[in-house]
Image (cartoon, coloured by chain):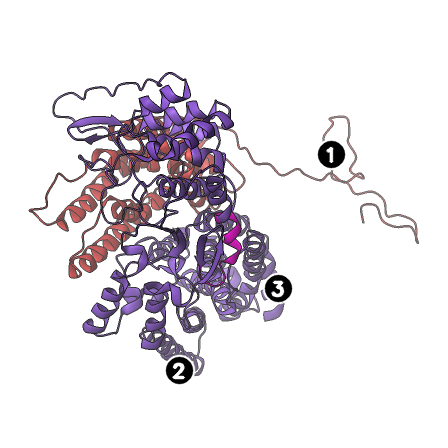
Chain colours: A red, B purple
Amino acid sequence: MPWITLLTGCLAGTFFLGVLAHVAGASYGTLNQASVRLAFLPAIAALAFLLRAPFRPLTQATPVPAWVVPAGHLLLAAPVLAVTCWAQLRIMAHTVPPHTLGHPPAAYPVIAQLTGWCAITVACAACVDRARYADLGGAIAIPVSFAAIALAWYAPVTSRFLIEPPASALGVTTAWYAIAAAALTLTGAAMADRWHRYSRHLRVERGFSRRGSGRPTGELPEPAAAGARPAGR
Amino acid sequence: MVLGLARVEASLLVRSVLVLAGLLAGALVIWFLIGSAEPLWWNVGWRIGGGQLVLGMAVLAVAQLNAGRARRDGLAALYASFPATAGTRAFAHLIGLAGAAPASLLLIGAAAVVIQGRGAIGSASIAVLAGGLLLVIAAGAAGIAIGARFAHPLAGALGALALFITAATNHLASGGGIWLLPWEVLQDDLSQLPGPLAGYPPAGAHALELAGLAVLAGIVALALTVGGARIRGRLAAAGILAVAVICSAGALQLRPIPTAELNHLVTEIADPASVQRCTTASEIRYCLYPGFGRDLSSVQAPVNGVLAHVPARPGQPLTIRQATLASLDETFTHGHPERQISRWNAQLQGAPGNAAAVSAIYLSVGSWPAAGGQLADARFDVALAAADWTVHLPFPIVNGQPCVPLNQAREAIAIWLAILAAHPPAGDLRDGLRGPGGGLTGTEVGNTMVQTWNYPGINAGYLTGVVPQPTAAGYLLAKAMTSLPEQKVSQVLDDAWATWLNRHTTDAQLATALGIPMPSVPGLPVPPPGTATVQGGPGNAPQNPVCTT
């Protein structure tokens, strides 16, 4: 379990929010839920590195299914992310003066949004892990997932369901949990997939001969006569 | 050897999927930041930098991956056996950042072409555009410095996020300090300036700061990878010099804008007649700031369309002029004494756009659209305001609630005139009967809920102030009038124009004179006790007055 990666992401975001809270406090300003969303991004970025199983080709050969390890990482990461979200919401609430008129906005839509963002990132990481960029893993999954989140946030077709206003708090919550469920389903399918999706086509030289078994022998052709161009160059 | 390695690293950077994705994302961000308003070069130059910021994030991540490649792949010992030392490789990475320049220049060039194609006002600032390029290079250098110490890809991602967060929040800096951030996107008021302000923003100093940051990041990357006390000593000295340059650039950026420049800006806003160029056509006076002359035809057309159908005009002539900032915020006034700031803001309070004028329409600087559906909406707004003037409805309402011409025939006439003049799509007109959530819109007038109609462009802010809030009844009657022959309606209006302008003349009387049934307005649902009232247009508060003048 890459604890250092996960904790680095969570602590970086929380530290940043703490700095923002201090700066806002000094200028008698307050933080809002947008600040919490920004501060949670490092934790989400760290999540993209949790699914990478370095010895997957080896673990696939063992009796234990290969998806057990990444699934275990996710289960262990969930409470850490929950604590990070709680801490950041507390920091935000701490900047609001105690006698402010009106009720503060509800936290459950933000929690749903962050859950959806985490699920999207995990799904992207699982898909990238099955692709040709598997060796870079999270470095590719992060921009892909953040681009997907930005698209969902700003595209007119989706933003009216995923952002309040115009959507209601309940509608936003439902939509993001639905997205999270779909993303986790995709993640499960990707993690359970045993076959590699990237391949490199081997260029077989024409001179390789095949014996009765049909397997190439690896024998190179006889050297060409002097003055003739060698094959394949 | 260094050049050979640099060439390879540059080609990897040019062909990197992440950099290409960053280029596309940067282009999208620029498109989003520029929006639909006509581009003003003193504003859009900085929006192009916003796209460069996104590209810079991608370059930072890729540079970090490249710099940490050896240790990430567990090949540090192998690379150490090569002739090229870690310091040589780091130097090659830094030179290889030239591979990011083509993407940055392509972004600048493409954005400039599109902006000029949309009819930009003013001229581009080379310092601002060069600052965007330097931002990308500095981000790459920072990525190399991060990768020299931390090989894990998360470090590059966190570095890119840190770059993004400095631009995405307005808590980290305020006033003149916003220009110290790697790139400013959120807090400036550049789009509302009537013209370029000399020395503001401090583009040259900002470019110098970014160059200093790029050099400092490169020095840090080299210091982490080279050996030898002498080389490290030289790097330390260079680092101190780079820090000094950065601090000097920061100090230059924090200098207050010269008083003379701000005096000129305040005069431009508070007394626009002294700088605006005015044209009179059909007895309507049009006054625009220098450089905005190309907007004259798009403003004249809807006004002429209204005047063509009006049998008589009001006695007081109409003036259409541009208006802008109501006050100067800290980004302009930092470093100036409070007394001077108060004097400027007091001057601005007397600006034409801030006072309710009887016969003037104020166009908001920086919000007039370039083209497309938004331009049609803006023309409709101007047409409606001009039509309100012809039927003696009060406008514009500044710093107050708009009145509602409840059951007044002149309201339907004004809407009819505006529709004839601007020819908006029927769908856009019909959509005004419903709010964003699909429900009916209304406002309370004299303890009665009245269904309102949100005209196209009502929320866009093309005009300073708001026209009287139209009602659904007035719109539906106007729509019915458009289905009649224009000559017939004109005849009815001409025969008793003074009667129709009387605020006591009702919609029903107009419908009877036209020989059409009065359109029915669906009733607003009574909200359950304890729930909020239905939404209305801008400026609608729980109670709106009836238009009486």
Q: Secondary structure under badge 1?
A: loop
Q: Is residue B297 magenta?
A: yes
The image quarter containing residue A148 is top left
- Which comes sooner in the sequence, label 2 or label 3? 3
Give the extent of the magenta segment.
B288-299
Looking at the image, the residue that sits furthest to the front is B495
Mark-to-mark CA distance, 2 and 3: 28 Å
Judge if badges 1 and 2 mark residues of a common chain.
no
Residue highlighted by disc 3: B7
Judge if badges 2 and 3 mark residues of a common chain.
yes
Query: Is residue A201 placed above or below B150 in the rendered structure?
Result: above
Q: What percent of the width, then of the height, locates residue A218?
A: 74, 39
Does the rendering let one see residue A66?
no
Mark-to-mark CA distance, 3 and 1: 39 Å
Q: Amino acid at mark 1?
A: Pro
Residue highlighted by disc 2: B237
Looking at the image, the residue that sits furthest to the left is A99
Mark 3 belongs to chain: B
Image quarter where the C terminus of chain B lies is: top left
Residue highlighted by disc 1: A216
Q: What percent of the width, then of the height, locates residue B1?
A: 61, 70
Side of B83 relative to B495 (left or right): right
Task: Decide: few, some or many residues near mark 1? Use Cα within 10 Å; few <14, some 14-19, many ≥20.
Answer: some
